Image (cartoon, helix red, strand yellow):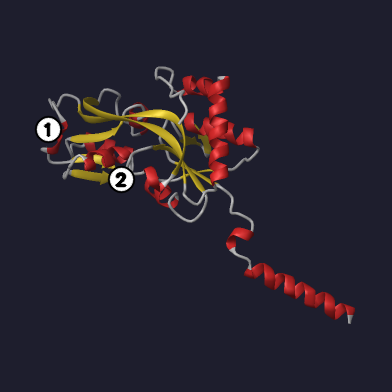
Amino acid sequence: MRFHMRHSLLAFAIGLACCLPATARAAPALRLLSEEFAPVNFSDNGVGKGLSVEIVREIQQRLGAPAEIEFMPWSRAYREAQGREPVALFAMARTPAREKLFKWVGPIVTFYSSIYAPNGDGVRLRSLNDAKKVKAVLVVRDWYTGEQLSTQGFKNLVPVSDPVQGIKMLQARRAPLFATERITMPQIMAQAGVPADAFEVVYSFASSEGYIAFSLTTPDATVKAWQQQLDAMKQDGRFLTIYKRWLPNDNPPLGKR
């Protein structure tokens, strides 16, 4: 009788656990996603490096919440950060079009949007309207630079999967222009095996602050805790130390969100 009762209680407990709503079960762990975007974030022989990687790891250490960083193509990471799991994707430009798609912690970096052309081709742009008239402007798919131009009415944007592909296509003259982010361009050109003087900036058109973007399913308490630790890093000098190691000639965004 006692044996039968114990098994009945066990079966009842298992059945009850299966019927509990998702919010009553253990919350899924926060995933950390990033892309190859040196020197802001990149991997080297499987090890994450870069400005935002160091900032994220410092926050993790202060919170006592370690987690591995997954590197993947931006379009995939951008899509997964809008899914059902708690996800943090970095570093992402915070733009009006993205504002309600994510929860934000930052700022951690400033991005600069520029249009490049092969050096010596004689391309000169007086305004964005001049760029609208060329055959094609390369942009990285789901990057904020393409988003900015699209909102300006560009109809000649040609998406590429990553910046290295854009650089190689520009070098091969498959398009006359490439709109991309400026501070990462030297290292991406080196990664693509293209000489540093192969391209020139022919027009600069915007700047945006970069953040750690959290999926909407991430608990507000988690986002708040990350922002508090980032603010503390800016107060105690740790943020500035990390920033100057990776971007010594750039002005860090030291203000709060």
- Identify which residue is drawn at 51% across, 33% down: 53
- Disc assigned to residue 141: 2
- Identify which residue is drawn at 17% across, 42% down: 153
* Horizontal and vertical percent position of residue 133: 10, 38
* Horizontal and vertical percent position of residue 188: 35, 32
Residue 172 occupies which quadrant of the picture? Answer: top left
Residue 237 visible? The answer is: yes
Nearer-the-camera pick, 52 or 208: 208
Q: Crowding at label 1, few (<14), some or many (≥20) Cα neighbours within 10 Å?
A: few
- The answer to whether marks 1 and 2 mark residues whose Cβ atoms lie closer than 8 Å is no
As drawn, which residue projects farthest toward the bottom?
1
Is residue 117 depicted above or below 218 in this figure?
above
Q: Crowding at label 2, few (<14), some or many (≥20) Cα neighbours within 10 Å?
A: some
Q: Residue flagged by tag 1: what amino acid is it?
A: Asp
Q: Which quadrant does the N terminus fall into? A: bottom right
Nearer-the-camera pick, 166 or 151: 151
Secondary structure under the numbered disc 1 in the rendered image: helix
Q: Which quadrant does the C terminus fall into? A: top left
Residue 39 visible? The answer is: no
As drawn, which residue projects farthest toward the top?
249
- Disc assigned to residue 102: none
Q: CA distance from mark 1 to mark 2?
A: 22 Å
Relative side of 157 to 6, left or right: left
Q: Which residue is mark 1?
A: 130
Q: Residue flagged by tag 2: what amino acid is it?
A: Arg
- Identify which residue is drawn at 23% across, 42% down: 151
Secondary structure under the numbered disc 2 in the rendered image: loop
* Horizontal and vertical percent position of residue 62: 63, 32
Is residue 79 depicted above or below 113 in this figure?
below
* Horizontal and vertical percent position of residue 212: 47, 38
Dot 1 or dot 2: first in sequence order is: 1
